Amino acid sequence: MEAIVSGFNRTIHEPTRLRIVAALASLGPDERMQFVALRDMLDLTDGNLGAHLLKLEEERLVAVDKEFVARKPCTFVSLTLQGRLALAQHVKALKEILDVQSPEAATSQATNKDRRGGTPSRRASARKKSKGGRKSGGTVAEAQALRFGRLGGMKLGHA
């Protein structure tokens, strides 16, 4: 479970920032959105959106560009490549947690049992522990070392 949590991006995980990044991710890689349009889309105040964008910009997840359009200042916001990658990793981590904890995952595991009983991974573990079984492609010495819990003089941990 710790490996899954490591995929989280704590900056993106905050709900408002997640909404900002998701909205910007809907744009193409070379597209950007006006600050005002993003503010209105997400129903945020100027100050709230500005504070969140500052945090995202510090982490290099978004780019904020200020230009003059028809002699008026205009702020544009875009998601950086680093931001797109961070969002993809964050979404993957969320999906893995949902998959691990969902009732569908438990049902899926139950359907993987076959007539020999147990899940495929449990059968593999049982084969490793049995006296006659050995990993295919390994040598007899490796099989014996696995049976006694040692390989190259080192003890192996069992999961």
Image: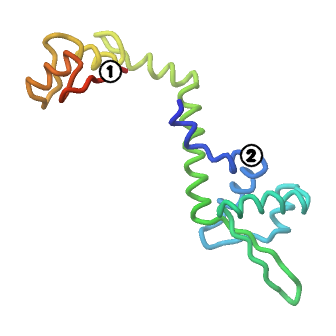
Which structural element holds mark 2? loop
Instruction: Give the residue displayed 57% in from the left and 21% down from the top.
Output: 103
What is the x, y in percent for residue 75?
81, 75
As drawn, 12 above or below 46: above
What is the x, y in percent for residue 86?
59, 54
The CA distance from mark 2 to mark 1 is 38 Å
Please rate how many residues cluster around mark 1, counting C-alpha atoms within 10 Å: few if below 14, some from 14 to 19, many from 20. some
Q: Indicate left or right for 9 with 36 as reference.
A: left
Kind of residue sitting beneath label 2: Glu
Instruction: Give the residue displayed 42% in from the left and 18% down from the top.
Output: 111
Please rate how many residues cluster around mark 2, counting C-alpha atoms within 10 Å: few if below 14, some from 14 to 19, many from 20. few
The quadrant of the image that shows the C terminus is top left
Q: Which residue matches tag 2?
A: 14
- Of the residues tagged 2 and 1, which is closer to the observer? 2
Sooner in the amino-acid sequence: mark 2 or mark 1 = 2
Question: Furthest residue to the left?
Answer: 140
Which structural element holds mark 1? helix
Instruction: Give the residue displayed 26% in from the left and 23% down from the top.
Output: 155
In front of the other: 62 or 144? 144
What is the x, y in percent for residue 117?
33, 9
Kind of residue sitting beneath label 1: Pro
Residue 72 location, quadrant: bottom right
Which mark is on residue 32?
A: none
Residue 48 location, quadrant: bottom right
As drawn, 154 above or below 20: above
Which mark is on residue 120?
A: 1
